[in-house]
Every structure is written in structure tokens, then in C-alpha cells.
Image (cartoon, rainbow, N blue to C red):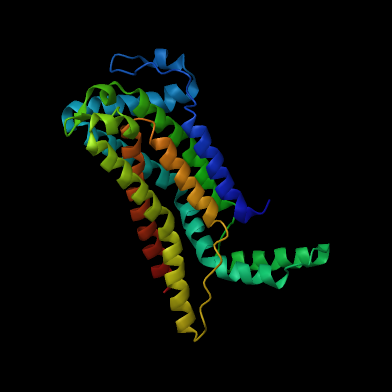
Amino acid sequence: MSKKRLRPVLAVAALAFVLTGCSVSTEPITLDTTFKEAMNDGFLSAFITYPLSQAINWLTPRTGIFLAIAIVTIVINAIVLVFTFKSSVAMQKMQELQPELQKIQAKYEGRTDEMSQQRMAMEMQQLYNKYGVNPLGSIAATFIQFPLLIGMYNAVRRSEAVSNATFAGVSLSLSPSQAIPAKAWICLVIFVLMVICQFISIKTPMWLAEKHGREDAEKHHKTYKKPDNQNMMMTYGMLAMVAFAMFSIPTAVSLYYCISSIVNFAKTLVIDKMTHREAA
């Protein structure tokens, strides 16, 4: 399988892993729950789910459940960014390199002999070196986020505050599917916003790559050719999977994904501005 197709497959696998629950226990985590008790549910629960749940439990009486989840989500994303900044930059640069990569692939299309494949790999590597991109480095961010995604999912699902607190008079422990007969429309609003924010977060790197590609083409008096986004069907499939899964689990999880998407959108814009200012 090519590197270009590997990352979406890994992301789908990660999503499936996250949404299966990973943690067997569904016992609520309260402020009285001890670390020793959390260890009974495993390493992931003790070192990720437990502290995140406790953070939500502690913040909720002081800020409300909406801000509690928002604060924890932003902090988690900030921590991830510290460890994955270079990978995130590489990921965005890889998106911008797609037109040139596709030119190289088209050049060797249908040539399956070993010599042609080696030449294609060499030309692609030269392109990576030219722009200082490590294609494997762009996958690192995805791997590092796996445990935190799983932990946050379980933290929201098991936090006592999520079960007891309300937002706009509605419990966020209700799923969007449960919200319809209960007429808890705020849950449906959060769900729809989550889907929209996820879509924007996914598409923003592509929009930016196309924008910079057009600018570069105009600068060098060339005709811009929009890259073939061969993974878009898989991307939209992932988005559909998220929407389908979120429809049947607590709205608090949709809120987490919604805020996380907004943070990722902002991160993408900041990284884009930094990298292109450096290139200017």
C-alpha cells in the first residue's frame, strides 16, 4: 500500500478503535474515584481517561459542563500540538506537494519494472528533500493522537459531571438520537455543528494547498492544475462514519469533536501562516 493511502486507512482504523469504546468498564468516574480504582480498568484508563474525567468533574461546578469540556479539549489539543508540531507542518506541506507528486506518478504510470519504480522513488525523495518534508513524519501526529482520542472519548462517556450536569437545561449525556423524542434540540444543534466543523477542518488544508498552488503558478506564469484528490471518497466516508457513530452516543462526545475541529482549524491556519512567512 502506498504512503499516500496509508494515513487515511490508519485514521479509519483509529476511528473504529476509538468508537468501540476500548475501555470495557462503563463505571462512572467521580471525584471520589481513586487512581488505584482506575488502574483496575487498565493503563489507558488510569493515565489518560481518569485524569481527563477528573478535570471535567472538577471544572464543571466552576464553569458549567460546556466550558469544562471546552477547556479540557483545548488543553489536550495544545499538548498534542507541542509533541506533533513538526509532524503537523509536514502534513500540510505534503498536501501542497500533491500536484508535483502526481506529476511524477503520471510520468511513470504503467511502468512497473524495477528500474522505473526506483527512478520514481528517487524523484519523489528529491522532491521531499527540496521542501524539507519527511513523508513518514506526517503520520506521527496521527499515531500520537490515538491514545488521547480514546482517553477523551472514554472520559466524556464516564465522567459523572456529564451524567449529572446540564447545558441549556438539557443533559449532554443524551445522544442526538435520544434528543429527538425528548425534543432536546440543543443536542441536535451541537451534533450538526460538529459535522460542519469536522468538514471544514478536513477541507481547510486542501483549500490552502490549492490557494498556494494557484499563487505559485501565477508567480511563475504557469497554468495551475488542481490535484486529483483520490482519497476524498475515503475522507467523506470517514466523516459519514463519525456522524453515524456520534448520532448514537452522548452529545458531550459530539461537543468534544466539535471544539477539537475548531482548534484544528485554527492550528492549520497558524501553521500555514508561519510556514509561508518563512518561505516568503
Count how many numbered circles sit on residues in the image.
Answer: 0
| 29 displayed left or right of 240 | left
Q: Is residue 202 left or right of residue 196?
A: right
Front residue of 134 and 157: 157
> Residue 20: horizontal and vertical position, in percent?
49, 29
Q: Position of residue 27 (x, y in %)?
A: 38, 16
Q: Write the residue at 24% across / 25% down.
A: 58
Image quadrant in which you'd find residue 192: top left
Q: From the viewer's perspective, is residue 275 above or below residue 198?
A: below
Quadrant into which the C terminus falls: bottom left
Q: Quadrant of residue 230?
A: bottom right
- Position of residue 17 relative to residue 110, above or below, is above
211 vs 46: above or below: below
Picture residue at 61% right of the left edge, 49% below the top: 6
Q: Give 254 or 38, whichever is nearer the viewer.
A: 254
Left or right: 162, with 102 as reference point:
left
Q: Residue at x 32, y 34 (%)?
A: 176
Q: 274 or 259, which lies in front?
A: 259
On the image, the x and y values in percent for residue 279 come to 44, 71
From this viewpoint, is residue 131 visible? no
The residue at 52%/36% (across/down) is 16
In depth, the one of 8 and 237 nearer the eye is 237
